[in-house]
C-alpha cells in the first residue's frame, strides 16, 4: 500500500497554515513589513552586512513559509526579504509549481532588487525544500555566484526525490508523467533523474566562491532518501538535524516552518565567525 497519508501531510500542513494565518490581498502585502521583513528601507549593519533572501518551497509562498524564521532573523539584526516564485495562472497562494529554470530567473531579478535597495555587494540565501535547491540553478547558470555569499538549504531536494518510491511507479500509469510535466512542471523537475536534475548536477554540485550548508532531517518524507539533499564539493557542510539534537522529530515541513534548532544552525552558517554550538537547548534561543 502506498503511504498516501505521509505523502499528503506536507500539503495538508501548508494548506492549514494558509487557511489559519495567511492574510489576503492588501493585508497580505502588509504582513511581512509589520513583522520586520521585506522592509525595503532596512540597511545591513556592520555585524550582519549582507541581506538574507528567503526562498519558499513547493506549494509555499513568501509569507506562510516564513512566519517563524523571518522574525527569528530580524530579531537577530538581519535585513530579511522573501519572494514569491513559480506561480501558475489561476492558482493562488500555492507557488513553486512553474518550471524551475524560470523560477531561478525570478530569483535573479529579486536578488538584484535586494542588493540595489540595501547597497550590498552580496546576499545570503536560505531556502526550504525546492527553495534550497532552485537557487543552485541561479548560482550555476544565471550568474548568481558573484552575488551570493552563502546558500543554506533546509531539507533541499538537491538531487531530486523519489517521494518514498512513488515516482518510480509513474511509468506504470500511461500519461501520468506527461500530465505532471504539463500541469505542474515544477514538480516534474524535482523527480530524481529528471532532465532538470541531470542538468543541474552535471559537472559538480557547487560553484566556486559560494559557501553551502545543507540541513537535512532523517524523518523527511518528501525528500527521499533524505541524504539526496546532501551536496558534494568544496565549501560544503552537510548536517543531519538529529545529530544536533537526537530528540528532534521534525519532518520535511516542520524543519522550515517551526524548527528553531535548524534555524539556529542556519544562523551559524550565515555568521560562522560568531557561531554558537547548536544543541537541543537551541530551541530556547
Image (spheres, rainbow, N blue to C red):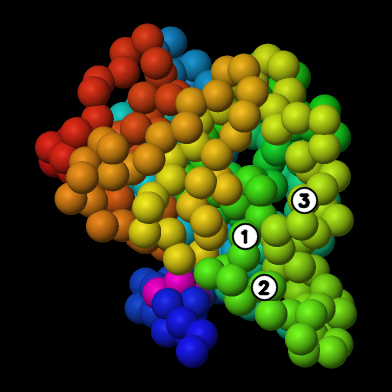
Distance from disc 1 to disc 2, alpha carbons, whole Å, reads: 8 Å
Q: Judging from the image, what secondary structure is the residue with disc 3 in? A: helix
Q: What label does residue 167 carry, if any? A: 2
Q: What label does residue 244 carry, if any? A: none
Residue depicted at x 43% and y 59%: 220
The residue stretch that appears in magenta: 9-13
Q: Looking at the picture, how far across and down is residue 257, in whole percent? A: 38, 57
Q: Is residue 206 above or below residue 168?
A: above
Q: Earlier in the sequence, mark 3 or mark 2?
A: 2
Q: Earlier in the sequence, mark 1 or mark 2?
A: 1
Q: Judging from the image, what secondary structure is the residue with disc 1 in? A: loop
Quadrant of the image occupied by residue 67 = bottom left
Q: What label does residue 197 carry, if any? A: 3
Asked whether disc 1 touches disc 2, contact meaning CB atoms under 8 Å apart, the reply is yes
Q: Looking at the picture, how far across and down is residue 2, in whole percent? A: 51, 85
Distance from disc 3 to disc 2, alpha carbons, whole Å, reads: 14 Å
Nearer to the camera, 78 or 8:
8
Amino acid at each position: 500500500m502506498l503511504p498516501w497519508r505521509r505523502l499528503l501531510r506536507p500539503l495538508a500542513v501548508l494548506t492549514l497554515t494558509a487557511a489559519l494565518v495567511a492574510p489576503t490581498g492588501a493585508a497580505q502585502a502588509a504582513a511581512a513589513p509589520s513583522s520586520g521583513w521585506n522592509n525595503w528601507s532596512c540597511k545591513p549593519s556592520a555585524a550582519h552586512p549582507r541581506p538574507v533572501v528567503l526562498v519558499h518551497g513547493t506549494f509555499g509562498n513568501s509569507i506562510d513559509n516564513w512566519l517563524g524564521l523571518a522574525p527569528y532573523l530580524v530579531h537577530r539584526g538581519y535585513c530579511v526579504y522573501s519572494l514569491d516564485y513559480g506561480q501558475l495562472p489561476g492558482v493562488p497562494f500555492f507557488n513553486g509549481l512553474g518550471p524551475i529554470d524560470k523560477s531561478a530567473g525570478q530569483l535573479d531579478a529579486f536578488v538584484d532588487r535586494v542588493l540595489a535597495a540595501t547597497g550590498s555587494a552580496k546576499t545570503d540565501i536560505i531556502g526550504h525544500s525546492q527553495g534550497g535547491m532552485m537557487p543552485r540553478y541561479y548560482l550555476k547558470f544565471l550568474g548568481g555566484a558573484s552575488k551570493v555569499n552563502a546558500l543554506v538549504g533546509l531539507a533541499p531536494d538537491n538531487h531530486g526525490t523519489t517521494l518514498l518510491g512513488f515516482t518510480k511507479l509513474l511509468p506504470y500509469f500511461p500519461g501520468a508523467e506527461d500530465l505532471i510535466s504539463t500541469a505542474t512542471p515544477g514538480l516534474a523537475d524535482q523527480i530524481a533523474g529528471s532532465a532538470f536534475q541531470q542538468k543541474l548536477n552535471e559537472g559538480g554540485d557547487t560553484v566556486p566562491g559560494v559557501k553551502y550548508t545543507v540541513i537535512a532531517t532523517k524523518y523527511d518524507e518528501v525528500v527521499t532518501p533524505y541524504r539526496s539533499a546532501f551536496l558534494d564539493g568544496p565549501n560544503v557542510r552537510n548536517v543531519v538535524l538529529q545529530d544536533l539534537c537526537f530528540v528532534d522529530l521534525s519532518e520535511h515541513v516542520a524543519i522550515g516552518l517551526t524548527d528553531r534548532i535548524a534555524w539556529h544552525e542556519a544562523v551559524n552558517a550565515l555568521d560562522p565567525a560568531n557561531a554558537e554550538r547548536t544543541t537541543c537547548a537551541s530551541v530556547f534561543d
